[in-house]
Amino acid sequence: MPPPVPENNQPVPQKNQATPVELAALFMDAACRPSAAEESALSQLAEFLDIDLSGMLAELMFLRAFSVDFAIQITLSEGGSEKEAILTHYYQHWEMVGKEAGVDIEADLRERLQYYLEATQSPEGAGSGLAEQVGLAFATRLVGGGGGGEGLDDLAMLGGSMFAALFDELTKLLEEVEIVILEP
């Protein structure tokens, strides 16, 4: 059977296909692996702001994990089995990472997902955008709620920008790909 043809007689382009396993692995990579250039820039920022680099890198990993989870939840809000399959495989990856590291990373992950989700729903940030709310939550997590000033603003901008860029990239990917569930 030939592909559907719209009114302008141009064939409808086929979407790229991916399985939930492939998408979950891609999303896990996006959450856990900063680029070398990113690590170098973050190292300089941490030194400038006198913040522990390993703590910043860990919090950015959780922020990226939230970005992935949030993008899946929003984009596939009515995704049914596709959404469930992707999330199942995604969290299985986190479980494996925790076992390999010998830590309960899943508890930290659940706590951070809840923390950032609450930031998106905070009535205090109702006048600001989603990226600003998430960015401020990220900055507050690193420097605490009592501080202010340039360090907090710089970290909020970093967190908000990282969230927005990854969220946009992932939602676009999820909208452009056909998710294929393979039968066992």
Image (cartoon, grey):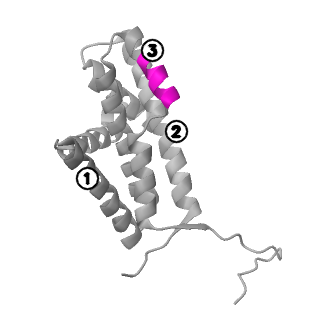
Q: Separation of disc 3 and disc 2 at Cα?
A: 21 Å
Is disc 1 placed on a helix, strand or loop?
helix
Neighbor class of circle 2 (other Cα within 10 Å; few <14, some 14-19, many 20+) is: few
Neighbor class of circle 3 (other Cα within 10 Å; few <14, some 14-19, many 20+) is: few
Q: Nearer the viewer, mark 3 or mark 1?
A: 1
For the residues bearing labels 2 and 1, Cβ distance under 8 angstroms: no
From which residue to which does the magenta span run? 36-43
Q: Amino acid at mark 2?
A: Ala
Left or right side of 43 for 52: left
- The residue under the point 41% across, 55% down is 25
Left or right side of 22 for 94: left
Return the residue at label 3.
44
Q: Nearer the viewer, residue 57 or 69?
A: 57
Q: Separation of disc 3 and disc 1 at Cα?
A: 31 Å
Can the viewer see residue 77 in this picture? no
Q: Farthest residue in the right direction?
A: 9
Is disc 2 placed on a helix, strand or loop?
helix
Return the residue at label 2.
165
Give the position of the N terminus as an image quadrant.
Answer: bottom right
Return the residue at label 1.
96
The numbered mark at residue 154 is none
Q: Position of residue 162 (x, y in %)?
A: 47, 34
Q: Farthest residue in the bottom direction?
A: 1
The number of callouts visible is: 3
Q: Nearer the viewer, mark 2 or mark 1?
A: 1
Q: Amino acid at mark 3?
A: Gln
Q: Position of residue 103 (x, y in %)?
A: 17, 41
Give the position of the C terminus as an image quadrant.
Answer: bottom left
